[in-house]
Amino acid sequence: MVLTMAYDYEYFKREVLALTAIDLNCYKEKQMKRRIDTLIMKHGIVGYDKYVHGLRTDRALFEEFVNYITINVSEFYRNPEQWKLMDEQMIPELIGRFGRHLKIWSAACSTGDEPYSLVMAFSRHLPLSDIRIYATDLDKQVIAKAKLGLYSEKSIAAVPDDLKRKYFTKIGASYKISDEVMSRVEFREHNLLKDPYPAEYDLIVCRNVLIYFTEEAKEEVFRKFYKALAKGGVLFIGSTEQIINYKEIGYERKNSFFYQKPV
C-alpha cells in the first residue's frame, strides 16, 4: 500500500529534526521511510503534516515515535563468541595497559543489556567496586527501562550460567538484575549524530546500531569514537558491522570486531 502524504518526506525530516534533534538524513532513507509510513498508517493518520501535528500535541504519540525509529533490539552477551574473546583477551590487556579503574563507554546502550553485560564480564577480573560504565542512548524511554533492570528469559539466554545464578533473580516471568550490578552503570541521554563526545575512554562499545546509518554518518561516528578513545583504547563493534577504512581513520584492527587506537 502506498501512503499518500500531504507534505513530502523532506518536510517531515525537517520537522522531526526540529522536534527531536534526530536527523533522519543520517539513516538509510528507504528503510526508515518504510518504517515511519507503517507507523503512521497504524494510527489511521493521513499526511505527514497531520502526524507532525500529533507529535507536537500528543506526548504518548511523540514518545512512541522516538522509541520506534531508534530501533531498540538488544540482548545480553549478544554474539557470545565475541564476549568470550573480550573475557579472555581484551579485558586482561586493557587492565594491563590502563589499570583497574578503566573508563568504559557503552554508546547507544538501548535497554541496558550491553552495559550490564560489561559489568558482569569485568566482574570476572575486578571487584565490582572498581567497575564503572558510562552508558548512553538518545531514547529516554529505553534508559528508563534499563534502570528498572527487568528482562525476559530470552534476553538473558546467552549470559553464562554462573553469572546468571549470581546476578539475576526470577520474579514471575521476568528476571531482575542485581542492584550491585545496576549501581555500576551511569545512564545519560546522548545523540551520537549531534552531541559532543566524551574523551579519553579506554573502551568504547557500540554494537549493531550503525547498520541503520548511511555510510557517511557511519564514518563520522567512527571518526568521533577514534577521537574519544585514549591512546591504546579499544572500540568494540557488532558482528553485523565493519570499519572498511579503519586504517585511514587511524585504527589498528585487533580482529573483526575490536579496533584499537595506537599507543
Image: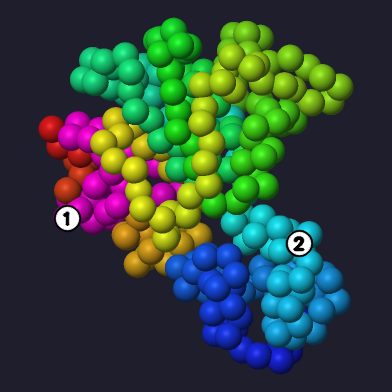
In the drawing, does residue 222 fall left or right of residue 165?
left
Q: Nearer the viewer, mark 1 or mark 2?
A: 2
- Residue placed under numbered mark 2 in the picture: 59
Position of the N terminus by quadrant: bottom right
- Tell me if I can see residue 38 in this picture: no
Q: Nearer the viewer, residue 25 or 16?
A: 16
Q: Which sits earlier in the primary sequence, circle 1 or circle 2?
A: 2
In the drawing, does residue 60 fall left or right of residue 158?
right
Q: Is residue 228 magenta?
A: yes
Position of the C terminus by quadrant: top left
* Residue 255 image position (x, y, % from top left): 29, 36
The disc at residue 238 is none
Q: Nearer the viewer, residue 70 or 197?
A: 197
Q: Amino acid at mark 1?
A: Glu
| Residue 261 versus residue 151 in the image, above or below | below
Q: Residue at x 22, y 35 (%)?
A: 230
Q: Nearer the viewer, residue 184 or 111?
A: 184
| Residue at the outermost front position | 57
* Residue 227 image position (x, y, % from top left): 24, 47
Range of magenta residues: 223-249
